[in-house]
Image: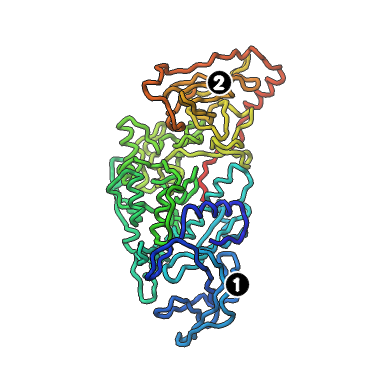
Amino acid sequence: MGETVNHPIISYFISHLFGCLVVWVIKADEEPFCGLMFVSVVRQCATNQYMRKRGDPHRYCQEACAEVTRCGPVIVPQHHLQQCKVCSDSGKSCGPTGPPDGPGVDGSDFVLYVSGVTTERCGQENIVAYAAYCQLEAELDRPIAGYANLCPAMISSQPQEFEGMLSTVKHEIIHALGFSAGLFAFYHDDEGKPLTPRFASGLPAFNESLGLYQWSEAVIRRVSRLWDIRGAEMVRHHVHVLVTPRVVEEARRHFNCPILEGMELENQGGMGTELNHWEKRLLENEAMTGSHTQNRVFSRLTLAIMEDSGWYRANYSLAQRLDWGRGLGCDFVMKSCKFWMDKQQQRRHPVTPYCDTVRASPLQLTCRQDQLAVAVCNLQKYPQELPLEYQYFDQIPDVATDQLSFFGGAVEIADYCPFSQEFSWHLSGEYQRNSYCRVLENQPDLWRNYGAEQYGPDSVCLYQKSAFVMEQCTRKMTYPDWGSGCYKVSCTNQGLTVFVQNRSFHCSRKGQLLSVSVRVGNWVYNGVLVCPACSNFCSSCPLPHQIPPINTTRSNPIDPCSSSPGLAITLWLLLLNLLPLVAGLLLCHCS
């Protein structure tokens, strides 16, 4: 793999990618092997029209090659280019012309041209970077050259945003390497044979309506689901499912569904999103879904599709754990989210990973599924009725029956299914911080720390039994948005310990209540936190018979009058806390 620009995000990705994927080389009469090769780039044609000769893998331009060959916005260096090959108008006279082949890029299997140019595409909303392939290998159709363009205006130096930008660049480059609707028709099996039949030209059939080469049913199949919607009705829901062998195996294992046909591809979002990503409803924070909402991970499923292309061998030990949908069974992966939520409610179980609380003021805060970020349910009202197949609710508290068809999750490509989502704070339109617990820079200012929270590398999201009460000798106040917060934890032989402003509280069991009383500055904070399961965060936890029966841990309440501040300080803090909060809460679902 070649690299032309030394940017920290690209460099970080390249080093990670080397461990995850290696090119799988298959040649006639040779054993397949993993290794580096030689890459040179075919010149572009002056008229953008080219010809192929039977039995000849080379591409010929009609009359002339272009003076400049580009890979995305990058001009390819002359020494990377092959000699120009042209044919006459009749196609009878074909051959090389102009400067000979350049030396190319030796010891490489993929050349990545990196740029940081403000382009028209950068002007589209929330585009951080984009990437694509430029050239396929003649024998096995593997991408051997591609580009990644980072949009300068979207590159941030804030630590809170680095991981998100990095995952976006990874996401885009994986498209260039093979996860792309434009490449599905070119996938090969493990023996190097095309999974989609070819014409004499060496190309598959072209689907004019999609603008893509048409894949076979050995790669993608269209299936129909019975889909529950509001009013006890069912409709047909049609989806495209990727059915290559490793993807099928990984999908069935992940969801614990032995009859699953394969892994659904995205069916919404329009050109560029539809069919080019995993289905958001089923793999919410998998990095190769169609929008970046939170905590992107590159799972075994994404490594499986790259290996099923026939071009790579994957190191699955480097796959990241994906919790969304894990082990939830066929009812989760093959039915609508309404069916799942109704079934969970009938069992008196949480509707996780979905949610059913309307996002409104004051906010009812919750935790992200992995309990590493404060979150809010993204169920909201739309200005128009949702399509019939995405109307899921028979009732919502305080919502009139004739308004139910307007409610759905904020992320449309998740089939409008609502889920708890981390968010960010903005002040006068400027980004301030987000709700991810493990970034120190997300720590709120002292006068806005309404729940005595502590953000940092050892912090997790804990549920609050009630709103924290902030007290001074003659003052008492609470913040209307409550339900969860970020707090530091540690693991010991006795289990999980929670720290609130350096006071420690021991969690013996899941659901145990921690009665907290701490002093922060001139205020005393009183509240109740709910212990999570020790096993959620610790590798070693007490056995059931070792857990004491007590269900509540209390700290001695602090007298708010024991150290009363001066009147001027009291009035100033009170004024700051009673000002209307200008900061807006914006859910993150960037492209």
The x and y percentages for residue 238 are 32, 53
Q: Is residue 410 above or below residue 14?
A: above
Tell me the residue at 36%/49% (across/down). 250
Q: Is residue 414 above or below residue 197?
A: above
Disc 2 target residue: 469
Towards the viewer: 84 or 362: 84
Towards the viewer: 492 or 434: 492
Q: Residues within 10 Å of mark 2 (few under 14, many from 20)?
A: some
C-alpha gap between disc 1 and disc 2:
69 Å
Give the amino acid type for the residue marked by disc 1 in the picture.
Answer: His
Helix, strand or loop under label 2: strand
Q: Is residue 35 above or below residue 448?
A: below
Give the amino acid type for the residue marked by disc 2 in the picture.
Answer: Val
The x and y percentages for residue 456 are 57, 34
Which of the colour schemes (rainbow, by chain, secondary structure, one colour) is used?
Answer: rainbow
Dot 1 and dot 2 residues touching (CB under 8 Å): no
Tell me the residue at 28%/40% (across/down). 232
Inspect this view and state whether residue 161 appears: yes
11 vs 209, left or right, is right
Towards the viewer: 354 or 110: 110
Tell which tag, 1 or 2, sits nearer the viewer: 1
Among the two numbered marks 1 and 2 on one chain, the one whose residue lies closer to the N terminus: 1
Q: Report the disc number at residue 79.
A: 1
Towards the viewer: 574 or 53: 53
Q: Residues within 10 Å of mark 1 (few under 14, many from 20)?
A: some
The x and y percentages for residue 331 are 30, 42
382 vs 471, left or right, is left
Tell me the residue at 42%/62% (across/down). 33
Inspect this view and state whether residue 483 appears: no
Q: Is residue 65 above or below residue 468?
A: below
Helix, strand or loop under label 1: helix
